[in-house]
Amino acid sequence: MEYRIHTYEALDSTNTKAAEEGKNGAPEGTVIVAKSQVSGEGRLHRKWQSPEGGLWFSMVLRPRMEPILVPQLTLLSGVTVIQALHDLYSISDMGIKWPNDILVGGKKVCGILSEAKLTSNGMVDYVVMGIGININLTADQFGPQVQQIATSMRIVSGKERDLNDVLETILARFSENYEEWCAGETKKIISLWEKYNMTIGQTITVKDDEAVLCVGKAVGIDEMGALFVESESGTIEKFNFGEISIRQ
Ligand code: BT5
C-alpha cells in the first residue's frame, strides 16, 4: 500500500482529522499523525491520554470488502502492532486483550479505535483505523486515572525509539497483513490473533459500563471477532465488541 503521511504538532484527535479527510475523498493509505492530541478518543467516548512521546496516528482505508468483515480490521491492526513491537523490542510478556488492547506485563501500551463509514448503497466508503501506542512516555506523563493500568515501551524496555522508525515498521507490517486480508486470507488474521491473544482460556468479567453482564471463561472468538464466554452456569454467551469491557 502506498502511504501519504501528514504529521501535525497537535490535533484534537487524529481519528477526527482522518474521518474528515476520508469524507473529502482522501485516498487509501492517508495517514494522519499528531505529536500530541488535545482530546484523544477511546471507545465509547472514553478519553485517551496523548501527551508528546507516544505514537498517535490514524489511517484512511478503503477496503473493497463486505462491510460485515470490517471488524476484522481491528483484529488485524492488533496483530500488526504486536508484530511490529516484536520487531523493535525484545519483550516477551506481550499480548492482545480482547478485542483491541495490547498489554505488556498486564498493563496497556496500545489502544485501537476504528470507525467505518458506509456509502448510501451499503458498501464501505472508508474506514478510519486509529492506533495509539505509548512508545517513549515516562511514568509521570500518565494522569492519575491510568497510572495503575498503563505502561509504555520505554518503561518496559528501558529504550527510547524514534517515532518515525516505529511508524515505518508498523506501516510495513500493516501493508503485508492488509494486502493478504484484501486478497481473501481472512482466516489467517484470526489465527494470528488467536496466537497473540491473552484472553482466551481466562476467567473474565464482561461489563457494560459498570453493570456486570457475565462472569465466565473466555472460550474463543468467531470470524468477526465476537467473543464466546462460557458462563458459570455452563451456557455459552456471545459478545460483540464495541459494547462491553472485560476484566481478566
Ligand atoms: C482504546 O479505547 O483503547 C482506543 C484508544 C485509541 C487511541 C488512538 S490514538 C490515535 C487515534 N486518535 C484518537 O483520538 N484515538 C486513536 P478504550 O478501550 O475505550 O480505552 C480507553 C481507556 O484506556 C481509558 O478509559 C483509560 O482507562 C485508558 N487510557 C487512556 N489513555 C491511555 C493511555 N495513553 N495508555 C493506556 N491506557 C490509557
Image: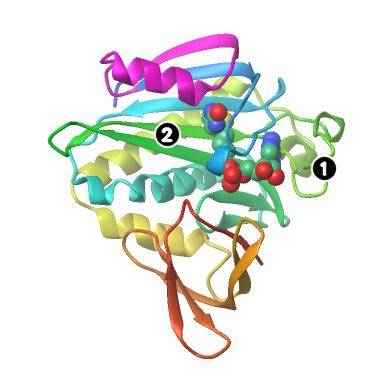
Give the residue displayed 45% in from the left and 56% down from the top: 241
**In the structure shown, which secondary structural element does the residue marked by tag 1 occupy?**
loop
Work out whether residue 123 or residue 139 is closer to the camera in this orientation and state it.
Answer: 123
Which corner quadrant holds the C terminus? bottom right
In the rendered view, tell whether residue 147 sits above or below residue 25.
below
Work out whether residue 112 or residue 105 is closer to the camera in this orientation and state it.
Answer: 112
Give the residue displayed 51% in from the left and 59% down from the top: 196
Numbered range of the magenta stretch: 4-29
In the rendered view, tell whether residue 212 sits above or below residue 156.
below
Q: CA distance from mark 1 to mark 2?
A: 25 Å
Give the residue displayed 56% in from the left and 66% down from the top: 199
Work out whether residue 239 or residue 224 is closer to the camera in this orientation and state it.
Answer: 239
In the rendered view, tell whether residue 16 sits above or below residue 69.
above
Q: Residue beneath label 2, please? A: 129
In the rendered view, tell whether residue 206 sits above or below residue 143.
below
State left or right for residue 60 relative to residue 186: right
Judge whether residue 87 can be spotted in this image.
no
Q: Residues within 10 Å of mark 2 (few under 14, many from 20)?
A: many
Q: Residue furthest top?
A: 9
Residue 34 location in percent, x, y?
57, 17
Residue 47 location in percent, x, y?
65, 35
Name which of mark 1 and mark 2 comes first in the sequence: 2
Mark linked to residue 230: none
Q: Residue furthest bottom?
A: 233
Q: Which amino acid, mark 2? A: Met
Mark linked to residue 147: 1
